[in-house]
Amino acid sequence: MISELGLEQEILPVPRSHPAAKERYLYVNKTLHKLPSSIGGVLRTIPPFTRPLFLCGLRDLAAPRGSKEDESIYDFVSRRFGKELADIVIDSLCRGVFAGDCRKLSVRSCFPFLYEAEVKRRSVILGMATGGDKGPPVDSELIRRSKQERWSQWSLQGGMQTLSEALEDFLRKRGVEIHKDTPIRQLERTADNGWKIKLPDGSITADYILSALPAKDLGCLLPPDLEPLVKELRQMSSATVAVVNLQYEGQVLPISGFGHLIPSTEERALLGIVYDSIAFPQHNKRGSSSTRLTVMLGGAWFESSIGDPDAVSSEKVLELAKTAAAEQLGVRDKPSRSIVNINKDCIPQYTLGHWRRTGNISAYTRQLSLPLSLIGASYHGVSVNDCIYNARQAVHSLLGH
Ligand SMILES: Cc1cc2nc3c(=O)[nH]c(=O)nc-3n(C[C@H](O)[C@H](O)[C@H](O)COP(=O)(O)OP(=O)(O)OC[C@H]3O[C@@H](n4cnc5c(N)ncnc54)[C@H](O)[C@@H]3O)c2cc1C
Ligand SMILES: C=Cc1c2[nH]c(c1C)Cc1[nH]c(c(CCC(=O)O)c1C)Cc1[nH]c(c(C)c1CCC(=O)O)Cc1[nH]c(c(C)c1C=C)C2
């Protein structure tokens, strides 16, 4: 999509050899611990772990296949790799991807490759070693370049918003009408098997809807006679994340890396900190040396540890973020700039049984021949890549490709 939108020149790749890709940290027992990046680090006991990590791998190779239709990520990893890995690494990772609690998230839906590896090969390591089912290949010149140069992450010169702006521009030039800041009020069925989309200032009709709305929001807009669909959508929940950007004058970080994650047993409210200026110094204020951090807070623990997202003040959240930067990174300077955003219900939580809910939805829409496809982060993957891939698949199947 980047190539099709003409954004190739804007790409800022980060290769795997860069410190932002190689150096990864966890904050445990009030200390930052660097995770091993070589085989030696896996063979030795390194803190915060109490035994060498390769023993977790041996346990997986020996463990029997599980028998449950679905299981929490925590239970799956504890059973196959041991409790310590689940408590420290997996707890943190789930906070860094889903802002979620690995004790509630579904392994089958959040990490389908782990689930499949156990079903097909009995062991995760054996499953990964034999490649697993990677799905249909996606190929382009840019993808080949990213593999050859071993990119671990990327951004764009003007930041990621460039992507949605370029997409908007591309679509408008091809005659697509875009209604911004226009909340849909209701979706009604029409007699000719189409839809009436009610907006604040009128309505529009459509033959077919590809909905990228969060599941719960869509559930509130659909007509009540689609009850089985509405019921499934309303059960799908999401987490609130506070994102605090802090900018400091000069290079104030004592370490380099992508960022660090914090397990829920260490600090419930603080999910992790990204060291943005290490991976993307190109985004620093022109001509100045600065350090930029993003502190992420809340997630599945927002209400219990920070409070009601509608009532909590930006000042309180900013204070929590500055304290985290000071205590965890020793960055005690006054930030020269800060931005606080409380993103309500921004990351879907694929909890136990999510696979059954999405399965029921597909079966029901097929059975009724509903002119509706569900895309977006609520169903089959929370990342930007997942959303783009699944949207493209939905269009292909709609057009019969
Ligand atoms: C803090 C944070 C960091 C992230 N980092 C990464 C990352 O590093 N890499 C990555 O791949 N992904 C990342 N993600 C995930 C990424 O943001 C999502 O994949 C992506 O935003 C999902 O897009 P979406 O369109 O499905 O949903 P959203 O972006 O949530 O958009 C849903 C839209 O629906 C609108 N809406 C709701 N109700 C209505 C209504 N009634 N009428 C009209 N519109 C409505 C909302 O206003 C919203 O704009 C991150 C997410 C968060 C929160
Ligand atoms: C849907 C929200 C997402 C957030 N981040 C990602 C998504 C899809 C992307 C992502 N983040 C991490 C990984 C795993 C990388 C890996 O181990 O190979 C992915 C695919 C981990 C991560 N996320 C954050 C940090 C500091 C890290 C650790 C990176 C490392 O290992 O060095 C920051 C962060 N990103 C998100 C949240 C909620 C968050 C919280 C601190 C959202």
Image: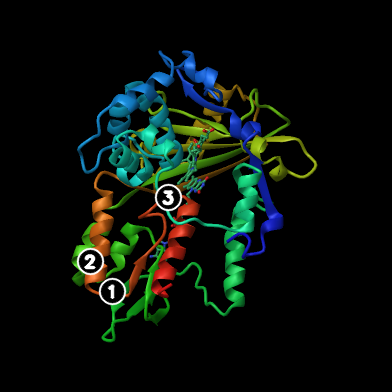
Q: Is residue 183 visible?
A: no
Amino acid type, mark 1: Leu
Q: CA distance from mark 1 to mark 2?
A: 8 Å
Residue 13's place in the image compared with 376, above or below, is above
Residue receiving disc 2:
364
- Looking at the rendering, in which quadrant would you find the C terminus? bottom left
Q: CA distance from mark 3 to mark 1?
A: 24 Å
Q: Earlier in the sequence, mark 1 or mark 2?
A: 2
Mark 3 surroundings: few (<14), some (14-19) or many (≥20) residues within 10 A: some
Q: Earlier in the sequence, mark 3 or mark 1?
A: 1
Amino acid type, mark 3: Val
Q: Mark 3 falls on what kind of element?
A: loop
Residue receiving disc 1:
370
Mark 3 residue's CB less than 8 Å from ligand 2: yes
Tell whether 367 sits left or right of 194: left
Q: Position of residue 185 (x, y in %)?
A: 35, 70
Q: Mark 1 falls on what kind of element?
A: loop
Viewer-side residue, 59 vs 333: 59
Work out which residue is located at the far right of the displayed protein and give it.
287
Amino acid type, mark 2: Tyr
